[in-house]
Amino acid sequence: MNTAELEQSILTSAREKLAAKQLTEAIDILTQGRAQCPQSLSLCHLAATTYLALGDPEASRRCGHDIWELAPAHPLGYHVIANSYLKITASYDYSGNQMCQQALQIAKEGYCRHPQHHGLLLTVIRAEMLLGMFNESLQHCEELLVSNPDMLGAKLYAAQSALSLRDYLTASSYASQLLVNAQTGQLAANILNEAKAGELATAIIEGCLEPIRNSSDFFISCSQMVSLGRDCLPAAFISRQGLRHAAMPFDWLVCPAETLLQTLQNDFHDFLDPALIATRQAGHSSYHLKYTNLQFPHHDLTIPDVHAAFCRRLTRFRALIKSSEPVLYVISEANFSIACEIAEYLPSTSRILSLQPEESMTMKTPRLVLADRLLHVEVAAFTSSSMLPAGWPVLRNKRIKTGGDIHCHYARTIIELTMQSFRYDRRVYI
């Protein structure tokens, strides 16, 4: 068997394992195959994509550099390394935006060298969207569609970018073109519903916010936006707008407002005490033994490296709340009185946005309460489709579920528009 036949045999075996979702076995085959065919770009590239599927972006990035050693400046190298950086956005030691920025720079360089490699431009678009650069991503989608008018990925990213820009007409136009395709039909239907919800929410919230904009200096220029929990919802909103500057301790956990207040009152004395943290699912999740409502659904803090990462996040957070930096802190599912107490522990230069979903059949307009540095926003949320008022849009025939409460896209749009009333020095992030 010559080298080309051996390479093809290895690729076939690895792809069979991938088709059967046996990723570890596929990597074993590819590792052995790369030792037998060290000059194979195809084996290296397939290994890189398999490592990404396994959740090991660092290994994938190393494969990208191996591609460059075999073929300097090869487009596959740019593609693999840029996508690896996008996967590292949840790294413990780096902010997601820094990794996205590196991915963007690498993908742009690769696309300048290889303008016919459309996968690189799609990676540029993905990075721009993650950085909140939706004008740029929409422009690049339209550029790609000039030469590839039927490219589904470009149409989908264009619709999502337009939706984030609140250009609902453009979003609906692109989404309508995707409805008939089996792969994108459901996503397109969701975008159309989100556009309808966005139009409704925009009309309502703008009227509520205008008096606050005109009568107070609440909407200041902020240097960054930081989540205080209760769950992943605030951090998800912040990330969606490309404004997650650094990893913070309350980004991806479940911490009710009452528990947050307790930890602030005792200066986080036992918040990360290893003796008070137990594993829920080994390697995946953990919980606190003292603060029984405090849970880490995405992290096992009994793992030393993970615990160390949270210690760094807590150190960063404590320094921030003792500084005079103008920060917007966002907390969900806190009642007004608790939110006011929490605000007392945050700097006088900061602002606090408290988001309280209310399960209500009659609340058509959000209730906004302004108290010094705190804006408390109550919005309608529904726990079943039957509770939706007539004519309200539905997302995936479900609600957006977080932390036990279910929020319709209407509520999400109102919350995002309220956040966007603040001004930010975006140079901090990109």
Image (cartoon, rainbow, N blue to C red):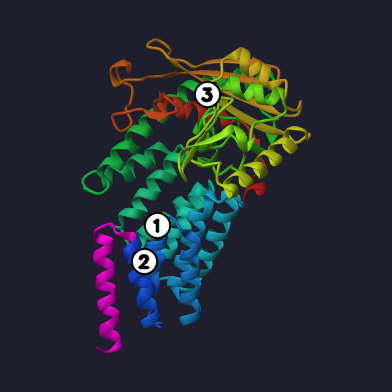
Label 1, label 2: how far apart the Cα atoms are: 9 Å
Q: Amino acid at mark 3?
A: Glu
Label 3, label 2: how far apart the Cα atoms are: 53 Å
Which is more N-terminal, label 2 or label 1? 2
Whether 301 is among the magenta residues is no
Element carrying mark 1:
loop
Residue at x-position 62% and y-position 16%: 338
Residue at x-position 71% and y-position 17%: 372
Q: Amino acid at mark 1?
A: Leu
Q: Position of residue 354 (x, y in %)?
A: 58, 22
Mark 2 lies on residue: 27
Mark 1 lies on residue: 54
Q: Are marks 1 and 2 in contact (CB under 8 Å)?
A: yes
Residue 168 location, quadrant: top left
Label 3, label 1: how far apart the Cα atoms are: 44 Å
Whether 22 is among the magenta residues is yes
Residue at x-position 56% and y-position 41%: 301
Q: Position of residue 142 (x, y in %)?
A: 40, 55
Query: What's drawn in magenta, residue-wise?
Result: 1-23
Mark 3 lies on residue: 206
